[in-house]
Image (tube, grey):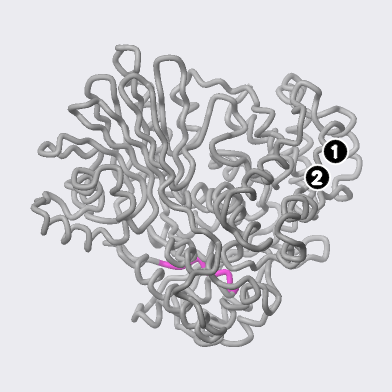
Amino acid sequence: MCGLSGEIRFDGGRPDIAAVERMTDRLAARGPDGRGVWSQGPVALGHRRLKIIDLSERGAQPMTDTEARLTGVFNGCVYNYRQLRDELRGLGHTFFSTSDTEVLLKAYQEWGTDCVDHFMGMFAFAVVEHDTGRLVLARDRLGIKPLYLSQTPGRLRFASTLPALLAGGDVDTSLDPAALHQYLSWHATVAAPRTVLSGVRKLPPATVRVVEPDGNYQDRCYWQPSYTRRPEHAGMDAADWRDAVLDSLRTAVRRRMVADVPVGVLLSGGLDSSLIVSLLAEEGQRDLATFSVGFESEGGEEGDEFRYSDLIAQRYGTDHHQLLVPSDRVSTALDGAVAAMSEPMVSHDVVAFHLLSELVSKEVSVVQSGQGADEVFAGYRWYPDLAAVEREAEPEQYAKVYFDRPHADLGRILQPHLLTEDDVSGRFVREHMAVPGAETALDAALRLDTHVMLVDDPVKRVDNMTMDWGLEARTPFLDHELVELAAACPPELKLAQGGKGVLKDAGRAVLPREVVDRPKGYFPVPAIRHMAGPVLERVREALYAPEAKARGVFRDDYVAELLAAPDAHRTNRGANALWHIALLEIWLQTHGIN
């Protein structure tokens, strides 16, 4: 829920309230139900509210606790806020609202920055200590909720989206060559703290940053599973792991039911979303609203999986909604999806999620989604190849299997001024995999995918596309206790049955076998994958625009080669290479970045 923004000055000046107002207004879609701005001394905070918990004005933000002398803004949901409120009451705290925001402030008063260790949920927040002038920024364990930063001499600004920071002004919008290297290597993923813009950074997941009044700061990473086998699981067989995973997922789904408004489900008809529907039905949910989207076939490729989502909807008697998108609507819908992106994203399902979120937001304000299960439980087709080498060879194997293209290829794609001297993406992977823990090759790959690639691709995608319509998406497969359990699960149980073996075993306990044993779907958008008519025209328009020529990111001969055969050039992972470069340029133009 919600969007936050703010500014702290380190030079003795007052914060630019007008800039904070502009940032706050740019977040309006994330929080259509309320708006607030607060300022004291060198700090100003802004907030847009989506009412999910405590629908009264007592839950409005920025929220000030006069007794604790704290003011905060918060985006997300602390699912165990009721239990924490009871615990804090027992410690002597009193409450004026029933919101989880107030629980966050009381928890900070009681435990300081260690409060994050008590939270189960998704969150990004900023808390100001009135007496010290200290600013505390934090982000949840899996980075489900975003927090962008822009620092210039004497000032730090922060916001829930990158476009909000742009609205504040005074941002260095030059391209970051290292981030561009990652973008072209990892299917448009750029790892925190970088973004493609040199002047914008991201607070990493599972991080608390304490910013002092003079601008100095300290970061603490407060959570990271080891990806090793743990003593408490010794002696567990496949059936024990199946039961443990199902119980943990059941708890995760139950936690995400907490709301003062109805909660629906994004139902693709695959194993992950179907499990959520089944477990919600098991919890007694009736007339559950479910939502599916599909696309017109193109190039002989099917664009919907309605037969599977219909099967689940009928079995559990859900209030089911379908959206079939014709190909000629994809190109027009693309512009809205790109405008909603905090960073450029090439995955086809951004358009799907944006269109579906528009439909869903007319019915409910909160949905559960199956995002993250493939990274957490090794569901993608490339995981067996990643697991096929010795642990020490995994960085090279990961680059071979996962990267869109090798470092050497970038010389013929990018203009010389944007090339890096070394393989920065390969170096990042080597350094990440050299960190202690992750005892097998697959453990190392899953640790990287879950805590880096997942955060800055699918998780960001879901947040951006849903929140652009004031819709909160909750992801039970990213419950941190479930992720800890999956990280400790033996790799062979995850790789079994073509991937997600232990989760498929759990699924068979509650779902029809035809859903569990179906071929894996990849949510295709054929009009993009095959560069069908209107989409190709949009791509040509962007790449030939005066802004693109002036910017000079890509080599002219490379662009001409791709446009001469739009559906012929694929990255190592099978993505359309033309789409990869065009999307970046479309994003830059959409957000007025020159």
Q: Is residue 123 above or below residue 542?
A: below
Residue furthest top in the image: 12
Q: Is residue 152 above or below residue 390?
A: above
Identity, as a three-letter code, of the amino acid under mark 2:
Arg
Residue 527 seen in this snapshot = no
Please name the residue that numbered disc 1 is placed on. 409
* Residue shown at the point (31%, 31%) measured from the top left: 135
Identity, as a three-letter code, of the amino acid under mark 1:
Asp
SS for dot 1: helix
Q: Determine contact: label 2, label 1, CB under 8 Å.
A: yes
Please name the residue that numbered disc 2 is placed on. 405
Percent across and percent down for residue 137 are 36, 37
Q: Which residues are magenta?
A: 264-270
Percent across and percent down for residue 217 are 39, 28
In front here: 146 or 166? Answer: 146
Gap in angstroms between the C-alphas marked 2 and 1 = 6 Å
In front here: 121 or 245? Answer: 245
Quadrant in the rendering for residue 305: bottom right
